[in-house]
Image (cartoon, rainbow, N blue to C red):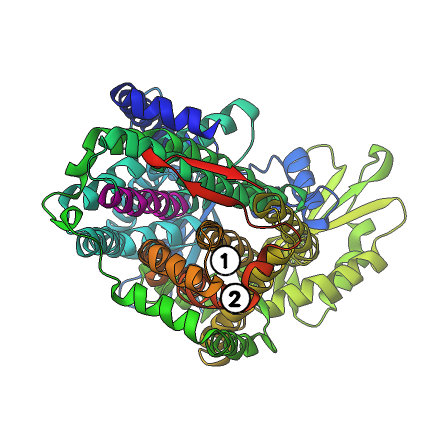
């Protein structure tokens, strides 16, 4: 099957390239336009139905008309001279709020938006006076804008609303400030725009520079990036299309994660092909380049297919997770990798067949045999001193793994970067009002049998909540239209996004609600703190399930691929040690030395999947070459030296490229994203340079052909024409 695909692609290369170009461009455009129709920004919506916060969200929607995409914006209004608001000022605030609630805000259209496909968020916002500072220094307006907070169109609508509010209050000599979820997102996006552009250009420049230094060729530097961009667009469009057809909601971070993954592994797979293509062109100078391309694509295609299926299998295990964000990420990455695999077996061989020896122009490297260089010396060192290399590599990883001791999970919702307007406004509000005022913990109460509720029946529950240490006050109950449901807003004395708030809600608040809810009534606790408390529980349960399932599935794939029991054990132990080392290093940098509360709660799972799956990619490539070289006969250690010499350049280059892709996330303003970028980049570098080039080859040198126990390595003889005959 693999050789059939690669053979067709090298015989009909222009057809294959044309199909990919059309599909990639169309799918990319549609995916970018429609992605915001399938993304879901509400964390509570990803919780299983049986969780308390998810049940509270259902009551809020069904009984109180809460909308999942209603984004809250808090508007601070104060006098410019710093004096308390007077009666005339308060009247002005109430009047403007009433006027804003009846005025439609039109969304400005940007050039990248397509009418008919892009969503128009023009609307009449809901605005009301929510609080006044005890000293009268400011008033707070609560505004609700409906839409996907990650959509640039929604950002444009918010800016239009902000301009209108500022204009209304400027006329009265009042100043305004904006904070809340949507305001924070827009400020963050505006503040990071230049940084993201610079980092993106630097990352692309680094990838091009690495390829230029390695191949000394223009085409070899730019063709992989161009091809991966086209395939990445096709993959993203496929995921978005599948989500539209199935009604599946995507997490806002999924599209960017897909892009990062595909750039890395796509360039990796292309590099594997390029290095082997150059090697075979040197060895067979008289043979037509299309025949060489077909042979190389068939050989490398087997290893690439195995590597890609390992990643697919690893992420497919997220289907057993209970937390929706994990279940979304798994299938999305798996589908994207399958698209990239198809491109690796069709588009990439077709490009090699078209370019031929021109792929390496203007380099003269094809005219002379490759020198051993650093890769050759590394192979000789591993073969000559395998025990020393093995012990040193294991000791390095073991030392980093020590950082795992005492590691804690941080379930914080992130924070607003310092220096933004939203952050300044939030601090001003916090200086005069309790932290929980702008983000209350809400208790929803429903009556069994549809009977009516009254305030007297909720007095005991309200009193119990007020008596919880950490709850500042509890507002009077708000009833739905038929009074069968009520809402109690509890204002915490701590930030709703803090660890203390999660502990408070998960423990004393929910305990008080359970004990004080009258018979015949049902109560659920919702709000930001409640959501993240339940997320913590769901993630903890998922980690205990996904880890062993993913490890078992990857091990099974390795057994089938390598036809061995010993080699998979070596590889799984190696990647397990690398995972521990990477997580330990992240904990050391961010928690033990950096003072963070812990590592982000998704980091262990993402690291496990990426380090184990992508690390296994490199191990599969080197193991495949180790098996091939040992099958040629001669001493096993000499075969190890040859395998390292031939695979080291490809693995090292691929590791640097993939690490650069993820490393770009390390300069993000969001602390959790920085952790993810740093740790994943480090894990990939350790997988490439320590595991695949030192630890695994040294283990193979020590075990010899016993590495393939209980089967014997295939005996291969190379005949004229480069064809291989395999036997037992």
Query: Considering the numbered disc 2 on the image, is that residue within a helix, a strand or a loop?
Result: helix
Q: Judge left or right: residue 495 versus residue 184.
A: right
Query: From mark 2 to mark 1, how far is it between C-alphas?
Result: 7 Å
Q: Nearer the viewer, residue 504 or 229?
A: 229
Which residue bears the numbered disc 1?
611
Q: Is residue 302 above or below residue 700?
A: above
Graded by Cα atoms within 10 Å as few (under 14), some (14 to 19) or many (20 or more), the crowding at tag 2 reads many
Boundaries of the magenta span: 261-283
Q: Nearer the viewer, residue 321 or 386?
A: 386
Say if mark 2 contacts mark 1, CB within 8 Å: yes
Taking the view exactly as shown, the residue that stands out farthest to the right is 519
Q: Nearer the viewer, residue 553 or 505?
A: 553
Which of disc 1 and disc 2 is earlier in sequence? Answer: 2
Q: Please state, as top left, top right, bottom left or bottom right, where the C terminus lies in the image.
A: top right
Q: Judge left or right: residue 155 versus residue 488.
A: left
- Please name the residue shown 32% across and 45% down the image: 276
Q: Nearer the viewer, residue 335 or 241?
A: 335
Residue 312 placed where, x, y %? 54, 41
Taking the magenta stretch, the answer to whether it contains residue 49 is no
To which quarter of the image does residue 447 belong? Answer: top right
Residue 708 placed where, x, y %? 59, 54
- Please name the residue shown 78% across and 57% down the image: 513
Q: Is residue 334 above or below residue 575?
A: above
Res. 346 in view: yes
To which quarter of the image does residue 234 belong? Answer: top left
* Disc sitting over residue 578 in the figure: 2
Q: Judge left or right: residue 588 versus residue 514.
A: left
Q: Main secondary structure of the magenta part?
A: helix
- Please name the residue shown 90% across and 48% down the image: 519
* Disc sitting over residue 530 in the figure: none
Query: Considering the numbered disc 1 on the image, is that residue within a helix, a strand or a loop?
Result: helix
Graded by Cα atoms within 10 Å as few (under 14), some (14 to 19) or many (20 or more), the crowding at tag 1 reads many
């Amino acid at each position: 099957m693999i050789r059939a695909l690669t053979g067709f692609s090298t015989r009909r290369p222009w057809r294959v390239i044309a199909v990919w170009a059309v599909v990639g461009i169309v799918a990319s455009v549609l995916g970018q336009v429609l992605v915001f129709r399938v993304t879901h920004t509400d964390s509570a919506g990803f919780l299983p139905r049986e969780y308390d916060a998810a049940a509270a969200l259902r009551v809020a929607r069904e009984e109180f008309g809460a909308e999942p995409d209603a984004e809250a914006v808090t508007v601070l209004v104060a006098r410019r001279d710093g004096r308390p608001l007077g009666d005339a000022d308060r009247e002005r605030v109430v009047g403007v709020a009433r006027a804003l609630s009846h005025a439609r805000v039109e969304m400005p259209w940007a050039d990248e938006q397509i009418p008919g496909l892009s969503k128009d968020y023009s609307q009449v916002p809901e605005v009301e006076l929510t609080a006044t500072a005890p000293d009268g220094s400011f008033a707070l307006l609560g505004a609700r804008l409906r839409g996907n907070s990650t959509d640039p169109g929604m950002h444009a609508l918010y800016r239009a609303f902000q301009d209108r509010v500022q204009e209304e209050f400027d006329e009265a000599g009042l100043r305004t400030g904006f904070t809340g979820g949507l305001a924070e997102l827009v400020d963050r996006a505006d503040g990071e725009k230049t940084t993201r552009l610079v980092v993106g250009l630097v990352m692309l420049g680094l990838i091009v520079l690495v390829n230029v230094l390695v191949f000394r060729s223009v085409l070899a530097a730019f063709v992989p990036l161009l091809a991966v961009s086209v395939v990445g667009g096709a993959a993203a469009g496929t995921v978005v299309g599948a989500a539209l057809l199935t009604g599946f909601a995507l997490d806002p971070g999924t599209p960017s994660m897909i892009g990062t993954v595909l750039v890395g592994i796509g360039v990796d797979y292309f590099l594997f092909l390029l290095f082997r293509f150059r090697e075979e062109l040197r060895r067979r100078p008289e043979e037509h380049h299309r025949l060489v391309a077909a042979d190389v694509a068939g050989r490398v295609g087997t290893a690439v297919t195995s590597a890609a299926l390992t990643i697919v299998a690893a992420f497919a295990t997220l289907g057993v997770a209970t937390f929706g964000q994990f279940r979304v990420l798994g299938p999305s990455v798996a589908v994207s990798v399958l698209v990239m695999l198809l491109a690796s077996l069709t588009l990439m061989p077709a490009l090699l067949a078209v370019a031929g020896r021109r792929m390496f122009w203007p380099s003269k490297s094809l005219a002379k045999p490759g020198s051993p260089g650093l890769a050759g010396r590394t192979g000789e060192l591993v073969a000559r001193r395998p025990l020393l290399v093995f012990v040193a590599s294991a000791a390095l990883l073991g030392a980093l793994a020590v950082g795992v001791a005492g590691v804690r999970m941080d379930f914080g919702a992130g924070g607003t970067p310092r220096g933004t307007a939203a952050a300044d406004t939030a601090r001003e509000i916090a200086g005069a009002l309790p932290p929980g005022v702008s983000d209350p913990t809400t208790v929803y109460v429903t009556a069994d049998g549809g009977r009516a509720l009254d305030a007297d029946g909720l007095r005991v529950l309200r009193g119990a909540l007020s008596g919880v240490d950490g709850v500042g006050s509890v507002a009077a109950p708000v009833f739905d239209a038929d009074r069968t449901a009520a809402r109690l807003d509890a204002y915490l004395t701590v930030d709703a996004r803090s660890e203390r708030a999660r502990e408070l809600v998960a423990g004393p608040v929910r305990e008080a609600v359970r004990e004080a809810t009258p018979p015949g009534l049902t109560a659920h606790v919702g709000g930001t703190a409640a959501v993240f408390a339940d997320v913590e529980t769901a993630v903890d349960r998922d980690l205990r399930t996904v880890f062993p399932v993913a490890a078992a599935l990857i091990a099974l794939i390795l057994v089938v691929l390598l036809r061995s029991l010993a080699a998979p054990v070596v590889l799984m132990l190696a990647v397990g040690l690398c995972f521990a080392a990477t997580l330990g290093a992240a904990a050391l940098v961010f928690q033990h030395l950096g003072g963070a509360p812990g590592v982000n709660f998704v980091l262990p799972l993402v690291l496990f999947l990426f380090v184990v799956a992508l690390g296994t990619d490199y191990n599969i490539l080197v193991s495949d070459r180790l098996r091939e070289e040992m099958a040629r006969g001669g001493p096993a250690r000499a075969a190890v030296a040859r395998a390292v010499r031939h695979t080291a350049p490809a693995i090292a280059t691929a590791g640097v490229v993939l690490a650069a892709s993820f490393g770009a996330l390390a300069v993000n303003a969001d602390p959790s994203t920085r952790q993810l970028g740093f740790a994943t980049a480090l894990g990939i570098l350790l997988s490439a340079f320590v595991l695949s080039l030192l630890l695994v080859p040294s283990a193979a040198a020590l075990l010899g052909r016993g590495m393939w126990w209980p089967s014997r390595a295939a005996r291969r003889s190379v005949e004229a024409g480069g064809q291989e005959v395999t036997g037992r």
